[in-house]
Image (spheres, coloured by chain):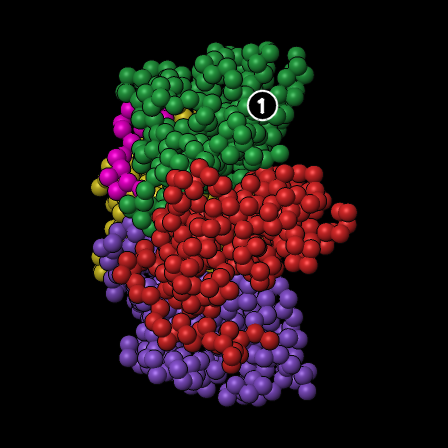
Chain colours: A red, B green, C purple, D yellow
Amino acid sequence: MGSKYKELKRECYEANMQLNALGLVIHTFGNVSAVDRATGAFAIKPSGVPYEELNAEDIVVVDYDANTVDGNLRPSSDTKTHAFLYKNWDDIGGIAHTHATYSVAWAQAQQDIPIFGTTHADHLTTDIPCAPPMSDELIAGNYEHNTGIQILECFKKKEISHTEVEMVLLGNHGPFTWGENAAKAVYNSTILEAVAQMAYLTLQINPQALRLKDSLIKKHHDRKHGKDAYYGQ
Amino acid sequence: MGSKYKELKRECYEANMQLNALGLVIHTFGNVSAVDRATGAFAIKPSGVPYEELNAEDIVVVDYDANTVDGNLRPSSDTKTHAFLYKNWDDIGGIAHTHATYSVAWAQAQQDIPIFGTTHADHLTTDIPCAPPMSDELIAGNYEHNTGIQILECFKKKEISHTEVEMVLLGNHGPFTWGENAAKAVYNSTILEAVAQMAYLTLQINPQALRLKDSLIKKHHDRKHGKDAYYGQ
Amino acid sequence: MGSKYKELKRECYEANMQLNALGLVIHTFGNVSAVDRATGAFAIKPSGVPYEELNAEDIVVVDYDANTVDGNLRPSSDTKTHAFLYKNWDDIGGIAHTHATYSVAWAQAQQDIPIFGTTHADHLTTDIPCAPPMSDELIAGNYEHNTGIQILECFKKKEISHTEVEMVLLGNHGPFTWGENAAKAVYNSTILEAVAQMAYLTLQINPQALRLKDSLIKKHHDRKHGKDAYYGQ
Amino acid sequence: MGSKYKELKRECYEANMQLNALGLVIHTFGNVSAVDRATGAFAIKPSGVPYEELNAEDIVVVDYDANTVDGNLRPSSDTKTHAFLYKNWDDIGGIAHTHATYSVAWAQAQQDIPIFGTTHADHLTTDIPCAPPMSDELIAGNYEHNTGIQILECFKKKEISHTEVEMVLLGNHGPFTWGENAAKAVYNSTILEAVAQMAYLTLQINPQALRLKDSLIKKHHDRKHGKDAYYGQ
């Protein structure tokens, strides 16, 4: 039974260990998941296990309703948020959640990260959205499930697409990022943290710093992701 | 005689070395202690010994009045503060004192660290208290003993419990943290430093940043420490 | 055919790997080139290849019009900027482009880095120039070629020499640096990043900090680069 | 002849390598010297040699007038400043000069570092002095010799003793530190950098932060350096 998910758990394990190696989390903070669309299940870090003690066989596999289908440990306390996103966004393959310093600081400041430069525009063409904290009713209810709702409503309200903007800040909490697989989700967490630090410093140097102008946003996005893209191999 | 405390000294030694490895101290700064409630004694770092030169056998064992019961070196100059806390709080097993950068900065600024996010709320539900500097009389008197008094009075005045808030800043000095054992005390020092940095950056980004609302504080605390906790294994 | 450029590609490869080892770039960001004036060609990093996967044989060699003369991969998307600079400045041997944190922050703030101290004056005698973002027409046109034009016009307008000031910030983008060879270009990127961080902190401590006075600028420059220089061997 | 200074050169070499290992300098920045009072000579880093390429035999030995008495390389361009200090302060054994980030930032801001906490008071009881930049006449003259004069005049004007305050900032330049030997001078450079960062952060958190009160300054100094000191072994 376990062997069915062996590769998925390995992918998830390695992405989680990257999170720690890259300095985006300490202790037991954060979690990464990887989905297998064929079986309708995803692998996720077990709850409260330090990265130093984590093994590939500890990874838990759950379905889109967060019911465990493989593994002996309790899955991450954020599992229902992952489940909600996988259910609603059927084109993503991995999700990462970190407590990276600058990303968390912007989330705690409850501010979108303005697009100030081409490092940002190489990856997305809008400000990085910060979803507001939930209402007290939603917090008291199915909290982690409702966190997923909060993310979707933020994207709907701001009219941005999750395939173009693969990251979000949750107000007072921290970042969630996603991508075609778990490694890409972790990659996006590192981009978010780098951009968050650069934007922080930019505003310290010049509180009146201007957002990148539209022509430059378009140019940097198109040369990397447009139909005539010439970035990469 | 020394062998009686061998394990205690080993625990204390390893926790001290962690302090250094984690970048919370440099040179001879800081100290960690570990208590053995059965014998009424605790092990602590010797005074002024660089971490690079510290050996497990150098650890000093003292009683709750700070009298040496084992070891040839002079104990940490902060020993009486540890002794006072062990005497008054009979449910703690270890204490750590660091000069970690962001923790010290908040202590020097003489400000409580506001609870801005869930990273903070996962560990405690109040602001991290900063005890004011002592009166000149207390400083000129039994200084390190009085430092313990200062911590207890701060907790009494703010009506917070040392089992719920396992950390404090001493105004103009730095942090003390504690826990069920020495390793947990060091763990709490790392949490404090991470939260101190995030709170610093939050206020730099948004000087009007709001404290985490009560419903979110309660939710994050309860899911990790409440009676229906579902965080961890 | 490839062997003709073997040494040039090796120099370019090693300089690129330095960029990554020194923490000036992450992932696939940035690029370094090295020119061979005899053959009128320069070697440059291939586009979008992570440093971890880069090999010396992946390096691409192009002429001053950015046409590939050796190599199977697509050259860096910034190749035309390098080409323009090599064509116009026939006395430089290498160019580096990074996304180093503090350098990018100043570029995003669209501000020159003021000369505040001798660390800066040991390397150049003027503020580090920040070229303004291009007009929309130039962006929509031959963007990377026009980036080269933007740099030259900035130097012309500010009346500074590229042999005396071997670095520039591109507004909203990041730094370009150059030198007698690729290693010197990378060296200049590290100097720029160090100076950018020091200047940032200086203004945080003292927003009214004064530029270094002319006599000190002259002294530090002359003792290192003047006709009676006594710095170095 | 060279063997006479072999041990002195070894001490100087190791202290210089520590400077680099501790992250206080990059490339060829900074220098450490060690004096031999018996022969009236001191060993110092050669000028402009990268730490990666430095060997013990490269160290230059000069007398108090900066004339080379041993070694084939040109001594540090700051040699005359060291010579002046050794000549005037006959109780110091080593001097270090760095370009450490936070120390330089305070020097560029031309501000004394206020004594905000016990980390500072454990080492000295006054603000860390920042000497103003020299007059244009002194700069144009015997610059490095005059830098020594500038340091002595700063201490005289502020009525502080070089045996109690083993560090100074040179306005727009950076820190010089000293001590009983070269290793202690380097130790003082690390203390200065740590205190400089903490003071910077303190003022960012609380621009109205108060200096440590006199009773605490006295207490922390006395327990470590007073006649009834009980810190250390």
Q: Nearer the viewer, residue A10 or D14?
A: A10
Q: Is residue B139 above or below residue A64?
A: above
Q: Looking at the picture, how far across and down is residue B196, in whole percent?
A: 41, 39
Q: Chain of mark 1?
A: B
Question: Label 1 amino acid?
Answer: Ile
At label 1, counting other C-alpha atoms closer than 10 Å, the crowd grade (few under 14, some 14-19, many 20 or more) is many
Q: Looking at the picture, how far across and down is residue C186, in whole percent?
A: 50, 68
- For the point 27% across and 61% down, the residue is A208
Secondary structure, mark 1, is: loop
Q: Nearer the viewer, residue D33 or C183?
A: C183
Residue D166 makes an appearance in the image: no
Q: Nearer the viewer, residue C45 or A147?
A: A147
- For the point 51% across and 30% down, the residue is B225
Q: Looking at the picture, how far across and down is residue A42, in whole percent?
A: 64, 51
The answer to whether residue D54 is left or right of residue C213 is right
Marker count (numbered):
1
- For the point 54% across and 21% down, the residue is B93
- For the point 38% across and 80% down, the residue is C139
Q: Looking at the picture, how far across and down is residue A50, in whole percent?
A: 60, 39
Residue A214 makes an appearance in the image: yes
The answer to whether residue A117 is left or right of residue C31 is left
Q: Which residues are magenta?
A: D205-222
According to the picture, the residue beneath numbered tag 1 turns out to be: B59
Specify the quadrant of the image occupied by residue A158.
Answer: bottom left
Q: Nearer the viewer, residue A71 or D80?
A: A71
- Is C188 magenta? The answer is no
